Amino acid sequence: MRIVFDSSSHEDGQPSLNDCIWSGGNLNPNIFHLIISFRLNTIAITADIERAFLQISLRDEDRDAVRFLFPDIRSNQTDPYKFQVYRFKHVMFGVNVSPFLLSATIKHHIENYREQYPAATEMLDTCLYVDDVISGADDISQALKVSKDAETIMKNASMKLRKWNSNDQTLMRTWEKEGLETQPRHPDDSSKIPSSKVLGIPWDVVHDYFTIDVKGLLQLDTSKPITKRIVLQSAGKIYDPVGFLSPYTIRLKCLLQELWLRKLSWDDKLPPDIHAILDSSGDSSEVEIHTFSDASQKAYGAAAFLRVKHKDRVSVDLVTSKSRVAPLKRLSLPRLELMGALLAARLAKEVKKILDQKCSTRAFFWTDSQVTLHWIKGPSHRWKSFVANRVREIQFLTDPNSWFHCSGKDNPADLLTRGISVDALTTNSKWWNGSSFLRQIDFQTKGLDEAIPERVYLTEMRKNSNPKEDISLTLRVTKNNFLENIIDISNNYVKLIRVVSFLYRFIHNCRTRITKIKGPLTSQEVSHAENWLIHSLHEREFYEEMRKLLAGEPIPMKSELTPLNVFLDESNIIRVLDESRSFFIVHTGYFSNIPKCIKAEFIASWACSQSSVVSSSQR
């Protein structure tokens, strides 16, 4: 049992603890990438850190923020309403910053072992999601070494890796002999699925496959009327990070869209027709990614399959899928097919990026739309904007020659566009193992049918466009600079500071719903904005000097700041220290379009006398 505290609770009109704490950045790996990488390993490895958050202590001065009341149960006290005030000494469950503190602490710790244990350090750096290790290896010796090294690294941080689990029974027995704490098993009963999960997905370790309880996917309480609220709550409980159930979940997405179109309130009983819909409701020589796309007037989607050609057989398995509900603005079917093709291109790019870390892969793309193939294989500038933009991105992400035609009955992505029931999905071999032609040792790809009438695919051609003439243009893209855009707003320094101050206020008010700031600008807001502007200018004009000063090293001799006695203040702003005062410095040449009277205000004394001003000429 684990106590998780509700750090988002608050009194009316008052901020919660989570509102007052910066949540930190997301240092965890992408779940999608982690699960697909996990499936590529011959030997799978999982573990977790015992009481991970409680191994990190809070500084004494920060503990007042996590005080709590507890009944006074001392023997000499009998008053049931008497309480004692306690403070937490360690990081708590339920605070928004806790995952960041854990990840940052571990990443800082493992850097000390990168040279001594490179493989284990890399595993802990890239395969640790909060306190769960999700990794693998190609052989037992590699798996044993990396697990023992990881155990040593974490032990030196007073953190214990426990519940080691693997699909290899020999490795499990070796771990037990080496003293590693393994996941408890059901003794002598392989029919029972071990209670193990990989990032929330049940994992049958004995048979080495993921399991999904389809009976519990959408359990609705029929004792009371089914409403839009209940359907949305039930759909939100479905956890499918890699799209195994997309042919089923797309039906729910379409259903929810229909409920919104009918403008039903949250607690209105579902109409009979909607209710009826709800009720019905190893060593390889070649590794290939085959991605299928399809569309209908209601939905479009893509499904990616991994095809591995072994010496004597071919295996095809579903890797992932994506589906989208068709836009409310009605589009032609060819355009929807093109959107499905774009989704396939994006999906295959993500999958290939992960697979290429293990082995070289080839990508193939399939669609049953001849029109879409004509668009993809033709110059993008020939088509109207909607088609041209999407064809251009597809051609950037994929090789147009890798796109082929398949019949509608051989297209597993067809299931994404119309949806099927859960019972039918579990036994649908085309969805789980791809089209039958992929399982042939040698199969023939089909290209374009050149006999297709031109009027079908030329409806999207631009006016005055000659398909026989291709025009090539060279474009130069310039990247806008945020700081330059701010400076260009005005030549008035005071106005610039006020603009930046209001920008910071806007960002603050967007991030919180309770402690919104209103009224005139405060001195703290103005000071914060001015510090940002000066610091940004220093980073731009004195980048090398800033880098050296932050590292505690002397600035380069060729720098124009070398003759000056410069240092960084608490806001990382470069200051010049003389006998009487310290002041900002700014490369005033950057403001060549600003009058001198304004430039002078950029070189203001703050450390000793905020009223003194040093002109540009004095510098």
Image: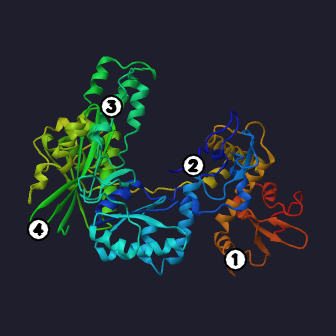
Where does the C terminus fall, quadrant-wise?
Answer: bottom right
Residue 300's image quarter? top left
Residue 463 visible in rendering: no
Cα separation between marks 4 and 2? 52 Å
> Does label 2 or label 3 sit earlier along the sequence?
2
Residue at (43%, 71%) from the top-left corner?
Answer: 122
Distance from disc 4 to disc 1, alpha carbons, whole Å, reads 60 Å
Residue 609, horizontal then vertical, whole percent: 89, 61
Instruction: Determine which residue is flagged by label 3.
Output: 254
Tell which tag, 4 or 2, sits nearer the viewer.
2
Amino acid type at mark 1: Gly
Q: Earlier in the sequence, mark 3 or mark 1?
A: 3
Comparing 572 with 146, the one in front is: 146
- The residue singled out by tag 1 in the image is 552
Q: Which residue has dot 4 on it? A: 311
- Between disc 2 and disc 3, the foreground one is 2
Quadrant housing residue 386: top left
313 on left or right of 346: left
The numbered dot on residue 94 is: 2
Three-letter amino acid code at the position of disc 3: Cys
**In the structure shown, which secondary structural element does the residue marked by tag 2 occupy?**
loop
Q: Position of residue 121 (x, y in %)?
A: 46, 73
Q: Nearer the viewer, residue 221 or 505?
A: 221
- In primary-sequence order, the first of circles 4 and 2 is 2
Q: Earlier in the sequence, mark 3 or mark 4?
A: 3
Query: Which of the two labelled residues, at mark 4 and mark 1, occupies the earlier sequence position?
Result: 4
The secondary element bearing badge 1 is classed as: loop
Residue type at tag 2: Gly
Helix, strand, or loop for circle 4? loop
